[in-house]
Amino acid sequence: MTYPAHKKARRPYNAFQRGYEKALADINKPMAVIIKAWSPSVCPRCYKSFEDFEPCNDGYYRRAMTMQRCPYCGQMLDWIHLDITE
C-alpha cells in the first residue's frame, strides 16, 4: 500500500501520539502496590521502594497509604487491594 507524500509525513506523529496517549492511560490506571512482609512497599511500575517515605523505627514499616502516585514515575497507586506476602 502506498501513501501520498502528505500522508506519509503524518504517520510517525500519529504513532507517537497514540503511544503517548497509551502511556498516559496506563499511568493513570491504578495498580496495586507490591508489599512484602518486613520490607518497604514497592511501585508496581518502576519497582523502586518507598523506604524514604515509610519510616521503620521499630522493625515495622508504616505504609505510605496516603500517596496517590509514585514519587519516582508518577504511576497511580492502589492501596485498597493489599496482599502482604512473605
Image (tube, rainbow, N blue to C red):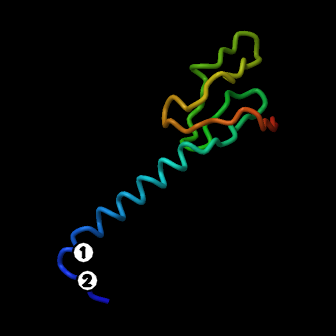
- The amino acid beneath tag 1 is Lys
The percent position of residue 35, horizontal first and vertical second, equals 73, 34
The percent position of residue 40, horizontal first and vertical second, equals 67, 27
Above or below for 2 versus 12: below
Above or below for 14 versus 81: below
In this rendering, position of residue 25 left or right of residue 84: left
Above or below for 82 versus 57: below
Q: Quadrant of residue 69?
A: top right
Q: In which quadrant is the N terminus drawn?
A: bottom left
Question: What residue sits right under mark 1 in the picture?
Answer: 7
* Residues at circles 2 and 1 in contact by the CB criterion of under 8 Å: yes
Q: Quadrant of residue 32?
A: top right
Question: What residue sits right under mark 2 in the picture?
Answer: 3
Q: Residue furthest bottom?
A: 1
Number of disc labels: 2
Residue at 76% in and 26% down: 38
Q: Nearer the viewer, residue 85 or 26?
A: 26
Secondary structure category for the residue under label 2: loop
In this rendering, position of residue 18 left or right of residue 4: right
Residue at 25% in and 83% down: 3
Secondary structure category for the residue under label 1: helix
Q: CA distance from mark 2 to mark 1?
A: 6 Å
Give the number of the disc on residue 57: none
- The amino acid beneath tag 2 is Tyr
Q: Nearer the viewer, residue 79 or 53?
A: 79
